[in-house]
Amino acid sequence: MSWRDLRCGELRPEHVGQRLTVAGWVDTRRDHGGLVFVDLRDHTGKIQLVLKDAGAVHELRNEFVVQAVGEVAARAPDAVNPNLATGEVEIQVESLQIVSRSTPLPFQIGDDTVEETTRLRYRWLDMRGERMQRNLRMSHAAVNGIRRTMDDLGFIDIWTPAMTRGTPEGARDFLVPVRLQPGKFFALAQSPQLFKQLCMIGGLDRYYQIATCWRDEDLRADRQFEFRQLDLEMAFVEREEVLDVMEAAVVGAFEAVGKTPPERPFPRIAYDDAMSKYGSDKPDLRFAMEIQDATDVTRGSAFGVFANAPCVRYLVVPKTFSRAEHDRLVLLTKEWGAKGLANLSQVAKFLSEEELASFGVPEGSSGLFVADTEEVAAHALGLLRLHLARELDLIPDTDVFHWVVDFPLFKHDEETGEWTFMHHPFTAPTAGNEVWDPSEPQAVRGQHYDLVWNGWELGSGSIRIHDVDVQERVFTTMGMTDDEAKSKFGFLLDALAMGAPPHGGFAMGIERFVAQLAGEPDIRQIVAFPKVSSGSDPLTGAPTPMPDAVLAESGIRALPQEDPAKA
Ligand code: ASP
């Protein structure tokens, strides 16, 4: 005999008269003098059970698992519940078995006011609710849609190691000690980057994987220590072919979850334009409110703050601000690194007619100005643009996917004083720019591209270096000696020297993508068992200290740590 004939949410008037077995969780129980009504629930929905007020019925409590046998009956017309898919029927129970019991619950299923740590501590209860059921099933469907698309396009799924050498993706590595080689460590792969490139050099042509990646970074709304990527790589391709495949994968996922996909091709915007117009390399393009540049106009201004600044930029915001409102915006802008924020209405008296006319700030709007370095002005106004758009409700309910292209190949690392990679050190420079002075690399552009959805960076990719000399030049620019490059990346340099085809690829964060798809504010809602921002797992209590003897087996000893409880 099976545990159930139908799932709870599947019963319909067509089943009336049938004798069936159902099983599930007690959602609610109502006593009505002589009769007890139980809503029995599983992930498909609820069915009303009608029981005689006798025997085991008295013992029933919320979240007990029960199995019931009975006849499906039509509800009386005035008892029909139009809000429930099963609302026209009920089961007149003949026999009921309590399969397992539940202690009183720390929270009621589906209660959306519960604190997140409590939800995560009892994730199995949280998962019984509608939100996590929907998100985890949507995640599955999206991944299925992606897999189908990749398969249709001739990609093969190749498994690559989690335990490897450090992969430079810009985060810290998680280390794995090795008992057989005490004192040595594997790093958990920050991505399969070099393995997928080696697959191309190995003649595999079209690789993909739903790859788990590990990065030791501070946890945020869009970051967990471990996450999945749609990771892909293609040989003998130009940038546009990679973007085309990624767009197909996105559309495949939308279709798999029953949502209207975005139109293709997704618009492209150059990195320099993104930074100057929106102050961000992942701009939210659902609304305009572009940053304007006034530097040329204010060069010789009578207003010293503008005249003497290297860069003057502003936003035109469709609202006027009171003094108090403006002061609040000034505080925010200062937090974002700018020296201040000027409201045109307050500084207009220092400016010429020509200046005022060129700004084009209409009546009823405000011109908000930052006079600073180009980077600071872009950054602060980019954040202000987002802040005000949210506050003034200027963001329409649409989906905008776009590509950011033509990134610089290198950026200057203020901390180390060295040049470092913008994406990763395997990204190719643009064609025809393969030679540069390693001490002056700022003008070199890379074949790097990012995919952005409504201001969330979904992922990055690039056309890779397939020439060993260019690869060595990148390492030199980053301040690596030949010996260092050989010791860290000798295997890659060897492979590049043995017939490497041109190749390129991409990786898109699955959880970020699905969180957006599900309209969730953070990726923890998409992950079955996530960590919280302190970096621990409230469910299992991990991470935990290890006994010295266990550590010694791997050749390591823990440094004494201050007990946070005593500190
Ligand atoms: N490995 C890169 C990343 O994880 C993606 C890529 O360049 O394909 O961001």
Image (spheres, helix red, strand yellow):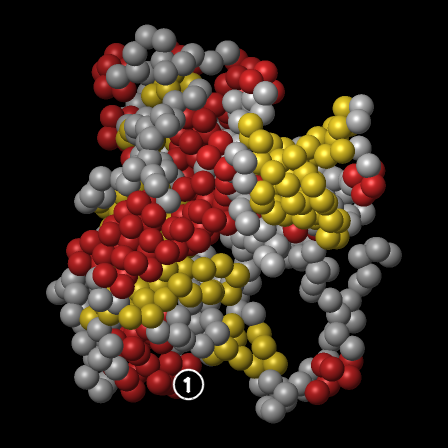
Q: Which of 78 and 110 is in front in this view?
A: 78
- Rendered-image quadrant of the N terminus: bottom right
Q: Which of 226 and 2 is in front in this view?
A: 2
Q: Is residue 542 visible?
A: yes
Quarter of image, res 484: bottom left
Q: Can residue 219 be seen in this view?
A: no
The answer as to whether callout 1 falls within 8 Å of ligand 1 is no
Identify whether 254 is placed above or below 503: above
Identify whether 171 is placed above or below 63: below
- Rendered-image quadrant of the C terminus: bottom right
Q: Where is residue 281 in the image (x, y as percent from the top left)?
A: 34, 45
| Residue ranking furthest to the top | 363
Quarter of image, res 93: top right
Q: Where is residue 500 in the image (x, y as percent from the top left)?
A: 21, 79
Q: What element carries label 1?
A: helix
Q: Residue placed at 67% from the left, 57% from the top?
A: 536
Report which residue position mark 1 lands on. 487
